[in-house]
Image (cartoon, coloured by chain):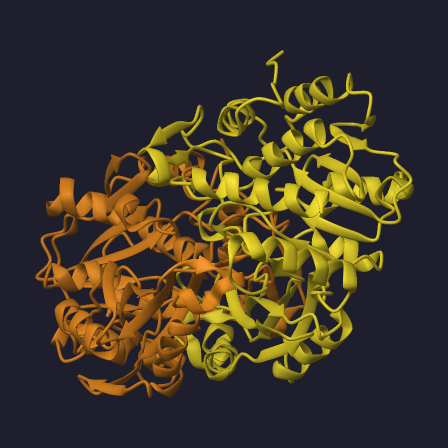
Chain colours: A orange, B yellow
Amino acid sequence: MPVLDPAGDLLTLTRALCDIPSVSGDEAAIADAVEAALAPLPHLEVLRDGDAVVARTRLGRAQRVVVAGHVDTVPIAGNVPTWLVGEGAEAQLWGRGTVDMKGGVAIQVALAATLTEPTRDVTWVFYDHEEVEASLNGLGRIVREHPDWLACDFAVLGEPTAAGVEGGCNGTLRAEVRVAGVAAHSARSWMGVNAIHGAGEVLRRLEEYVAADVEVDGLVYREGMNAVGITGGVAGNVVPDECVVTVNYRFAPARSVEEASAHVRELFDGYDVTITDSSGGARPGLDHPAAADFAAAALAFTGGTPAPKLGWTDVARFAELGIPAVNFGPGDPVLAHKDDEHCPVAQLTLCHDALRAWLTS
Amino acid sequence: MPVLDPAGDLLTLTRALCDIPSVSGDEAAIADAVEAALAPLPHLEVLRDGDAVVARTRLGRAQRVVVAGHVDTVPIAGNVPTWLVGEGAEAQLWGRGTVDMKGGVAIQVALAATLTEPTRDVTWVFYDHEEVEASLNGLGRIVREHPDWLACDFAVLGEPTAAGVEGGCNGTLRAEVRVAGVAAHSARSWMGVNAIHGAGEVLRRLEEYVAADVEVDGLVYREGMNAVGITGGVAGNVVPDECVVTVNYRFAPARSVEEASAHVRELFDGYDVTITDSSGGARPGLDHPAAADFAAAALAFTGGTPAPKLGWTDVARFAELGIPAVNFGPGDPVLAHKDDEHCPVAQLTLCHDALRAWLTS
């Protein structure tokens, strides 16, 4: 088993974590390594569920915070083990997971091990299966099976934000818009009604759709309404009787899933619309004192102002539990899942130092 | 081996042929049965190539005509063996092949056997693999390997025409129209260009397209321009960078394949257009004396006037050889390939009698 040195150099620790392959479904080795690194420490209680590891202090502080991160990655693309490019302030760590999100995980492991007396009680959560279908998500499993493990006043998720504070997240919803026609042989096409031609109107509405910018608790969320799939046709000589456009609506956390669904149904009025999956967004919650306090402390180190998180993240699970939560971690989120995933080493240090300062202030 | 009685009752012969399963690729049994029925007859020379059988008279007549039909069918759908519905003038023969086209084949077998001294020399052609990709077509194979077997002044193809005379056929061409975009995560869709939305313009042109009616040698061919397939999208959270619309253009025999291709390219100007397959049409050729003579003789029995054939048929192969050819056979072409394929028994007799009258006049 790879042995981690949580009290050692942060870059070395990050590389060690990245170099343990942990594509979703294959997290046992990395979970074992994290558990082995933290279990011996007397200031932590370490719990395990499947390949999720939870380590928490029990100091009786007035506040408890969760700092959480997933240990799985999307599939490796020839980019494990990691390699370092550049030196000093310019150094970049390349490889799968450097952005999403073993940099954040390394910071958690390091601080869990070394902060023996944080000013707030901390529950460090390492979980599995974030990069696959939502029903498998390790954090969701803990919510269902050990909700007490997540009890807290505020949560920080170490997802990549390029060391900014990103609050809340848009919701996401997928719908199938079905256009019906009448099948016919294409040699006698006037006997049919071409469903693909009919889908032109659906695409027209998408083209003309102007996505909203929605302000929620002081942050502006940019929405998006996009066809992410289209299928139609059964054979090269048949006028098709069905064409299905799959639409993905990313909606601001000001809207509920129900409101978002109604909006999509209204946009495609006249068509058969099926909502196939949905996840509500999360309001940024930066009006909550614990969140505002964190944002102030972190941004004192990293600069900038809180921003909306564009992609859906597990902060929405905390939002559902009524817990304010933000994203804060190293790495440019645009590089997540990309083959050229890489993270500035300086951001690792910056995020580490900001979290440490907050948890000791 | 099933034994055919070509000189017996026509309905019995048709049923016997239909009841020999002969889905494309599995024509050996039916070809053997046809060959066995005709080979012993002294007025015929019988030739064989694979599962194609050719039987011809050698009477030294001034004219030679080919009467051709394919012996294969599309897959059986629980509709073999045949069954009879109704009685007398209302009787209908149900089952696979009753329309496409063992009724026509039965007429050929019966007349080949019984017309010992036709007024024109006749080459009776029974061929395989018509219902599958063009490269396997048995008639095409004879054109390549034994072109002399098809030498003639005029050809009749027994494809279903509901006992009408249908001349020539439209050409057919398939093209892929490719719309390019720029991929992005759907949470940041403004960083991409949605290729599916872009395909809206392609569908708009198809919707607005007015198909032409084109008169060729006195028959009006109705064209058609249809999307027969559309695909786009790689994942539920990705703005797709490609959408491909597959278009089928059925074009009047006044246009060459090159002209038809140019027309499609012009319609989709601005897009990447790939012609994936094409087959030229066939002019009706009814201005040719042999064809006009046949049409007059056949329609004296069946009524009506010559009409254009809407689907592509092997008459186009004869057209390529410079031989005028028409379709004439029992059964409603709209029922071809349908699970409820069925043919009026009266049309079997009508087509049989019309062909016999022409070949003895």
Instruction: Please name whichever residue, A61 or B67, is drawn nearer the observer in this view of the structure.
Output: B67
**Residue lying farthest to the top in this orientation:** B1
**Place of residue A176 in the rendered image (x, y in percent of width and height, measured from the top left):** 30, 62
Q: Is residue B269 above or below residue B169?
A: below
**Place of residue B167 in the rendered image (x, y in percent of width and height, measured from the top left):** 65, 61
Q: Quadrant of residue A214?
A: bottom left
Q: Is residue A17 above or below residue A186?
A: above
User: Is A332 left, or right, of B180 in this rendering?
Assistant: left
User: Is A287 left, or right, of A7 in this rendering?
Assistant: left
**Residue lying farthest to the front in this orientation:** B361
Which quadrant, please, contains the N terminus of chain B? Answer: top right
Instruction: Please name whichever residue, A94 or B100, is drawn nearer the observer in this view of the structure.
Output: B100
Q: Quadrant of residue A278?
A: bottom left
Instruction: Please name whichever residue, A87 or A212, is drawn nearer the observer in this view of the structure.
Output: A212
**Place of residue A133 in the rendered image (x, y in percent of width and height, measured from the top left):** 33, 49
Determine if residue A21 is in view: no
Picture residue at 41% right of the left edge, 77% below the top: A200
Determine if residue A333 is in view: yes
How many callouts does the rendering have?
0
Picture residue at 47% right of the left edge, 82% below the top: B204
Picture residue at 57% right of the left edge, 47% below the top: B329
**Place of residue A212 in the rendered image (x, y in percent of width and height, measured from the top left):** 28, 87
User: Is B77 left, or right, of B136 in this rendering?
Assistant: left
